[in-house]
Image (cartoon, rainbow, N blue to C red):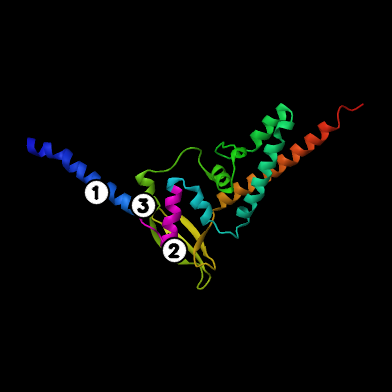
């Protein structure tokens, strides 16, 4: 009995080692973005690790919300250039209007990838739990219509990722409605903030009315 108990820690260590090696092996595999299973694995792993550069790259370039991101970033750069010319109170209001749902300040973004991460990210939280990784495991994939080049990949937990095949042969993600709304809200907010900043500076340059 004593010998059995003494061997338990060693046995447990071996099990943990094998499990960890298994997950490390899975995470180190190179997945093929030209296949539905490979694209699903790439996108799911990027979600789990918080790799916004990979997530951004995999979004279909024809998605209007992705195109708008360039304009959102340009607006933010212009706002940052003008912000010191505004009254202190307006500076605070403007900064509050340019925050994501997770309270990230969009004014900190220096690139489209960084801006994308601030908009759709969950603050500093990165999902890494084993349970969540199992929920994102690939289950099946189906083309929505023969020859359409559009696919729906289903995970073990029932969640779905929509893909479209482009001329380079790779599959790209059609973002969820929530992500599209978040990107569009950021664009609208940045445009309103920039218009407001320009108007305030214009009014202040007129000087006091006589």
Spatial CA distance of label 2 from label 1 is 28 Å
Which residue shows up at 65% across the image and 52% down it?
68
The reply, left or right, for residue 210 in relation to residue 44 is right
Q: Decide whether the magenta segment is chiefly helix, strand or loop.
A: helix
Identify the disc placed on residue 10.
Answer: none
Whether residue 117 appears in magenta in the rendering, the answer is: no
Q: Residues within 10 Å of mark 3 (few under 14, many from 20)?
A: few
Residue that sits furthest to the right in the current view: 210
Question: Circle 1 sits in a helix, a strand or a loop, which is it?
Answer: helix
Which residue in the structure is indicated by mark 3?
A: 27
Which residue in the structure is indicated by mark 1?
A: 18
Which residue shows up at 46% across the image and 45% down it?
50
Residue 102 image point, x, y percent? 54, 38
Identify the disc placed on residue 36.
Answer: 2
Residue 204 image point, x, y percent? 81, 31
Residue 75 image point, x, y percent? 68, 44
The answer to whether marks 3 and 1 mark residues whose Cβ atoms lie closer than 8 Å is no
Instruction: Please tell me which residue lies in front, 174 or 197.
Output: 197
Question: Circle 3 sits in a helix, a strand or a loop, which is it?
Answer: helix
Residue stretch rendered in magenta on the structure: 27-47
N-term mark: 3 or 2: 3
Q: Residues within 10 Å of mark 2 (few under 14, many from 20)?
A: many
Spatial CA distance of label 3 from label 1 is 14 Å
Whether residue 32 appears in magenta in the rendering, the answer is: yes
N-term mark: 2 or 1: 1
Q: State which quadrant residue 166 falls in.
A: bottom right
Residue 81 image point, x, y percent? 70, 38
N-term mark: 3 or 1: 1
The answer to whether marks 2 and 1 mark residues whose Cβ atoms lie closer than 8 Å is no
Residue 53 vs 82, above or below: the answer is: below
The reply to whether residue 1 is in sight is no
């Amino acid at each position: 009995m004593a010998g059995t108990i003494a061997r338990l820690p060693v046995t447990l260590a071996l099990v943990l080692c094998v499990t960890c090696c298994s997950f490390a092996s899975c995470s180190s595999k190179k997945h093929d973005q030209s296949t539905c299973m490979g694209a699903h694995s790439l996108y799911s792993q990027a979600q789990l690790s918080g790799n916004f550069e990979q997530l951004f790259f995999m979004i279909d370039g024809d998605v209007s919300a992705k195109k708008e991101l360039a304009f959102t970033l340009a607006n933010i750069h212009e706002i940052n250039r003008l912000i010191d010319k505004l009254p202190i109170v307006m500076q605070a209001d403007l900064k509050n209007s340019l925050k994501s749902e997770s309270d990230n300040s969009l004014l900190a973004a220096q690139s489209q990838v960084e801006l994308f991460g601030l908009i759709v990210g969950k603050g500093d939280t990165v999902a890494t739990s084993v349970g969540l990784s199992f929920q994102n495991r690939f289950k099946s994939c189906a083309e929505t219509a023969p020859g359409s080049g559009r696919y729906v990949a289903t995970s073990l937990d029932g969640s779905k990722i929509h893909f479209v095949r482009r001329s380079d042969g790779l599959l790209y993600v059609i973002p969820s409605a929530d992500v599209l709304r978040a990107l569009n809200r950021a664009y609208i907010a940045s445009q309103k903030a920039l218009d407001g900043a320009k108007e305030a500076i214009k009014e202040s340059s007129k000087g006091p009315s006589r």
